[in-house]
Each structure stands twice: as structure tokens, then as C-alpha cells.
Amino acid sequence: MTQSDTIFALSSGQGRAGVAVIRVSGPAAGTAIHALTGAPPGPPRLMVLRDIRDGAGATIDKAMVAWFAAPRSVTGEDVAEVHVHGGRAVVAAVLDALSKIAGCRPADAGDFTRRAFDNGKLDLTQVEGLADLIDADTEGQRRQALRQVNGALGLLYESWRARLMRALAHLEADIDFPDEDLPDHLPDALRGDLDALALEMRAHLNDAGIGERTRDGFHVVIVGAPNVGKSSIINRLAKRNAAIVAATAGTTRDVVEVQLDIAGLPVTLADTAGLRDAGDAIEREGVRRAHQRSAEADLRIAVFDATTWPQRDAATAALVDDATIVVVNKSDLAPACDVGAALAVSATTGAGIDALIAALTERVRAAADAATDAPPITRLRHRRAVQESHDALTRARGANAAELRAEDMRLAARALGRITGRVDVEDLLDVIFKDFCIGK
Ligand code: GDP
């Protein structure tokens, strides 16, 4: 299977639909359209109405056909899009007819995007952004992914790499033509720029993980003594918020999660085993997990009981910090209870649940707003590479031999080049494209 294959696949969703889009990409795309429609492709970037025929000349469907001549196409190759009626038999017949055309084969998962990358249409951050855009469930995820598809992150890394390469060029010139009078061969302006670059990298790394959290979800954990009403509160929140995914059932000792859409950002809300002095080993494990989840969470909801308030469960109270929303549940049983700055709620009647959602929204939004205008890191892969680049750059600044300094600068540039896919990425590609499905 070489690049000169022509690939085809259903690019719209599986199953019955008003319209289905079949994409064809490669050198035989024009021949394929000619074979299917009895005429050469129409003018580029215009839809034309054509009868689609099978190999025996029988009409399969009427279709809108769009033609994109290389290199002005999504993959950089000749591309045709055939918009047929979205019935299963229609789609199957068109795919079957395409498979009988010389040089055409069904696309593998991610094939179209892989070709776009190989032809320089997308860098790796854009490829990853495209995967995120297709997976986006919330507005925040969509906006972030679109920005990455549009190249904002790739441009940032490429601009950093260009600055490193410029400094490196100076260094290499100095190594070839050493100037005995200058102990530090980097001109002041360049040295200043490298220091500024290291600072920018640190700021980028210290973004509190907002990009990764927007992509993977904010983690909120609900803690409290057994029977204080944690599961009931989660159920209330999930119903009120129209959870993205319904609550995953589990035993009371398991960690139960629901996915919420809060202010356009995905929030994973986890219930935990009640905090208490556990008896048996399984229960102890549940409590251990509850503590671990609580420690890893971005936010906590600590639940206390209105019927015993202001007496508070000590194990839960010990977990309350700045990143904790304090809730006093079962307010229906103690209507006169004064909860002070805490939120009084009743999972049974639903009282106070809107205020709890508002408090959650405010916290999540505050975390999101803390992000700078610069495009955020969205993956651990980027974070590691930027850190590596930053560390190499810092070493380069401290090196006292020009050759060592140049070597560290090369490493710094290389680490950034790996993010966008400019340098040695073969080992990365399979990992990145494995999440793509057929037709992408
Ligand atoms: P968890 O162990 O903390 O998850 O607590 P559950 O959600 O399982 O609730 C324990 C018990 O308290 C159940 O019988 C609930 O029906 C009851 N409960 C929960 N929230 C309320 C509430 O706001 N008011 C009243 N009256 N009962 C509640």
C-alpha cells in the first residue's frame, strides 16, 4: 500500500441519514468519478448533480459531486466528495462500485488525515486538534480544539523553534569563526531573546493544566460521611444538568462518576465511599480510594449533615480547603439550621441544588479564566516536550563551551520540532493516528 493508492470511505456517520458523504482521495480520484458518473469531474470547488452508476451502468442514486484538484484539497491530493442519499444500500452500492475501480481501495482508519499530514496540510498539533474537535462534547472543548485545528498551538511552537534556530545559527558561525575577544559568543540581543523565550516557556508550562482539563475534564470529588447524601446529591446534579453520560452504576463502595457540562467545560463528578474508620479490607480500600480521589481532584464538594450541624464529621472537615465547596445536606430535616457561608441543600426536595450548580460553575469558570490568551497545552506529550526544550535551553545558557551550548540548543529546537511533527516523528505517528476512525 503506497501513497499512490487512491482511498475511499464513508466520511459521514454510519447508519441511515438524509445525506451520506463518501470521500475519495488520490491520483485515481478523477478516473473514479468518471467511472461513477460517466463524465470527468466538474470544475473544482463546485457541486454538480450527477447520476451515480455501478460497473454495469445501472443507476445507483442521484448525487451531488464536489471536486477538489490537488494540491488545494483536504489531503493535498485530488479529492472528490460524493453526496448521496444516506441509505445503507445506497452507500454500500457506491462503496462497492468504487472498490471495483483500478487503483482504488477502502481507506484505513485515519488515512485521509495521515495524507494531509504527509503532504504538509496539517502539523501534528492540528491533527490532534482535529481528533479533539470530532470528540468534543462541550462548547469549551470545541473552542479549544478549533483553535488548535486552526494552527494556533503549532504556530506558537514553530515561532519558538525559529528563535532557537536563529540563535543556533549565530553560535555555529562563532564556532567556525571564533572571536577570541568575546567569552560569550551570543550577542546581547540574542541572549536577551533566549532568556525571554525560557520565561515564555515557563509561563506556558505553568498554565495550571487548563488545556488538558478542558480536554479531559475537570475532576470534582464529593466527600462526606456515610449516609450524608452524597449519591443523592450526585443524582440531583446529573438530572438538573442533563449529564453528558448517565451515572455509571457501581456498588456503594466503588467510585461512581457522572460527566457534567458546566459552563461549557466537561466536569467529571465522582462519588466516593464514605469517609469513616472502615471495618473490613474492602471497605478500607474504598476509603483509601476516596482519599486518593480527593487529593487528585481539582475541586471538592464536602457534604455535612444538617441534623447534626454545626457539629461536623471530623474526617470530612479535615479535607476542607480553598478548593472545597461546603454543603450542608438534608436541610429539609432541619429547616432552622444556620449554615453560615456554607450552602444549605436538600437532595430530597431539590432545594439549594441550583445554588450548588452556580457555585460549581463559578469555580470552574474561574479556573478557565485564569488561563492566558496564549493557546494552552492540551496533551502530556506537548508538556513533556516543552519541558525538555526549556531544560535544554536553560542548560545552553549555563554552558561555558560554545560546542556544548550549540548541542543543547539543537536539543531544545528538536524537542519543539517533535511536537509539530517536523523532526523524527515516525515512532509517534502510529500512537497519534490510532484514535482516528475510518473516513477521517
Ligand atoms: P451517601 O452514603 O452519602 O451517598 O448517602 P445517600 O445519598 O445514599 O443517602 C443516604 C440516605 O439519606 C438515603 O436514605 C437518602 O434517601 C437520605 N437522604 C439523602 N439526602 C437527603 C435529604 O436531603 N433529605 C432527607 N430527608 N434525606 C436525604
Image (cartoon, rainbow, N blue to C red):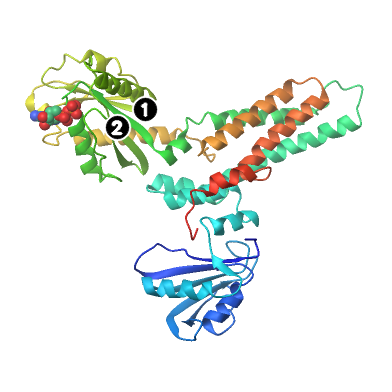
**Residue 80's mark?**
none
Q: Amino acid at mark 2?
A: Ala
On residue 270, the disc is 2
- Give coordinates of residue 263: x percent, y percent: 34, 42
Give the spatial CA distance, label 2 vs label 1: 9 Å
Q: Residue at x 43, y 63 (%)?
A: 12
**Residue 344 at least partly seen:** no
Ligand 1 shows up in the quarter that is top left
- Residue 381: image location, x then y, percent: 55, 37
Write down the residue under mark 1.
Answer: 297
Q: Tell me the SS state at disc 1.
A: loop
What amino acid is found at the position of numbered circle 1 in the picture? Ala
Packing grade of label 2 (10 A; few <14, some 14-19, many >=20) is many
Name which of mark 2 and mark 1 comes first in the sequence.
2
Q: Count the labels in the image.
A: 2
* Residue 40 visible (yes or no): yes
Residue 295 sits in quarter? top left
C-beta proximity under 8 Å, tags 2 and 1: yes
Q: Position of residue 359 (x, y in %)?
A: 28, 32
Residue at (30% x, 34% y) in the render: 269
- Reply above or below: 378 against 314: below
Look at the picture and state if 326 lies above or below 362.
above
